[in-house]
Image (cartoon, grey):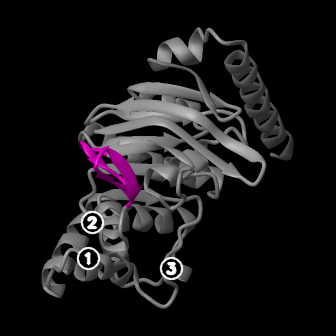
Amino acid sequence: MLQLTELKKAYGSNLVLRGVSLTVAAGRAVALIGPSGSGKSSLLRCINYLETPDAGTVEVDGELIGQVRRRDKLAPAGEALLRRQRAQIGMVFQQYNLFPHMTALENIVEAPIAVRNLKRGEARDEAMALLEKVGLAEKATAYPASLSGGQQQRVAIVRALAMRPKLMLFDEATAALDPELVGEVLKVMRSLAEEGMTMVVVTHEMEFAAHVADEVVFMDGGVVLEQGPPDEILRQPRHHRTRRFLRRLNASKASEGENEIDAA
């Protein structure tokens, strides 16, 4: 479903992706882990061409994204083609980015009407079915300001799903949530994985990576250092940087737990 070949991206003199290649089979969930600044978010943004890679290619379901072949050479895709391609790739960010003046339902139906050319009634029916699926049907007429962070993020996920994407990208979708709200969003993501949605998930939630992901990819310094099944990468990592990252992450989690106990 997803094929990345030698992706490179620089911001000025800062080379954030140094030739990343990755294959994700249809129906598989991949957890992308690594320290801050390792290039994970930039990689996601290059997949759907929110950022234009400096080199390399992205293919989704066999189609080049953001580029077209002309006489054995690659050229930038036109804006109309790029918009159509982006519609096939759902993305959920740390921040929910909901329109504050629209209800949850209105936030969801606008893109299917404008891009998929659905009639409003059909778009509404599909949106209500998705809201029901994530346990938010009763919040359809609520405005974002009246929703919790977890509820807003579930609406953001539904908004992406309403486009019927072939691939879903999650960029630390739970990072902005209070700890007690993380579970409700992870539950929705787990459900999507179980239903066979192809997913690439940037996350620090190792429980999610361990129990939901089919594969874990560790990035550092703009490259993929190792990848494999969750049990292998999270329990017996081969690379010393992976081991160091997991030790620091576990130590941080333990410290947070002690602080919570002290506060109680």
- Determine whether the residue tagged by mark 3 lies in a helix, strand or loop: helix
Q: Residues within 10 Å of mark 3 (few under 14, many from 20)?
A: many
248 left or right, relative to 186: right
Question: Are circles 3 and 1 on residues that touch, CB within 8 Å?
Answer: no
- Determine whether the residue tagged by mark 1 lies in a helix, strand or loop: helix
Give the quarter of the image for residue 218: top right
Residue 245 showing in the rendered view = yes
Residue 191 showing in the rendered view = no
Residue found 66% across the figure and 12% down from its top? 239
Residue 160 versus residue 203 in the image, above or below: below
- Residue type beneath disc 3: Pro
Residue 195 versus residue 177 in the image, above or below: above
According to the picture, the residue beneath numbered tag 1 turns out to be: 115
According to the picture, the residue beneath numbered tag 2 turns out to be: 163
Residue 186 belongs to the span the image colors magenta: no
Q: Nearer the viewer, residue 196 or 222?
A: 222
Q: CA distance from mark 3 to mark 1?
A: 23 Å
Residue 66 belongs to the span the image colors magenta: yes
Give the quarter of the image for residue 205: top right
Residue 144: image tag: 3
Residue 121 percent location from the top left of the image: 14, 85
The mark closer to the camera, 3 or 2, is 2
- Residue type beneath disc 2: Met
Residue found 14% across the figure and 85% down from its top? 119
Segment tinted magenta in the rendering: 60-76
Give the quarter of the image for residue 238: top right
Q: Nearer the viewer, residue 23 or 107?
A: 23
Give the mark nearer the N terminus: 3 vs 1. Answer: 1
- Residue type beneath disc 1: Val
Residue 78 percent location from the top left of the image: 35, 69
The mark closer to the camera, 3 or 1, is 1
Q: CA distance from mark 2 to mark 1?
A: 8 Å
